[in-house]
Amino acid sequence: MNACGACSQDFTGVRDFDSHRVGRHDGDRRCLGTGEMRVKGWFVDRYGRWSHPRRLNGSVRVPRSGVASPKVEA
């Protein structure tokens, strides 16, 4: 479990957790919002955790609704 204490979202790993934090550490650091993450290609896995788009190779995307859909090749 890699839950964020600031935004309460859960992430698939520490690297994904770190990636959702943006801005400088000296004051304007913040979490990406769920809308921002979706626009950037983030997705929620079958366990309800946010995953970075780099994880899409061979995986299945699961929207927040919980209904799985296969990855679509572009």
Image (cartoon, grey):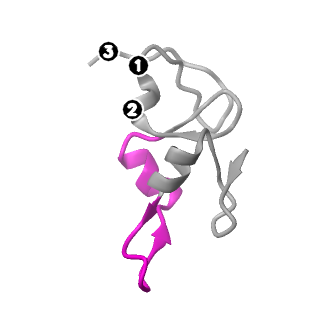
**Which quarter of the picture shows residue 23?**
bottom left
**Of the pair 63 and 5, the residue shown nearer to us:** 5
Which residue corresponds to mark 2? 54
Q: Residue furthest left?
A: 74
Which numbered mark, 1 or 3, is in the foreground of this view?
1
Q: Give residue 36's position: percent from left, percent from top.
A: 42, 56
Is residue 27 shown in magenta?
yes
Q: Indicate the secondary structure of the residue bearing disc 1.
A: loop
Q: Give residue 60's position: percent from left, percent from top.
A: 53, 19
**Which quarter of the picture shows residue 47?**
top right
Which residue corresponds to mark 1? 57
- Which segment did they paint magenta? 21-42
**Of the pair 38 and 58, the residue shown nearer to us:** 58
Which numbered mark, 2 or 3, is in the foreground of this view?
2
Amino acid type of disc 2?
Arg
Amino acid type of disc 3?
Glu
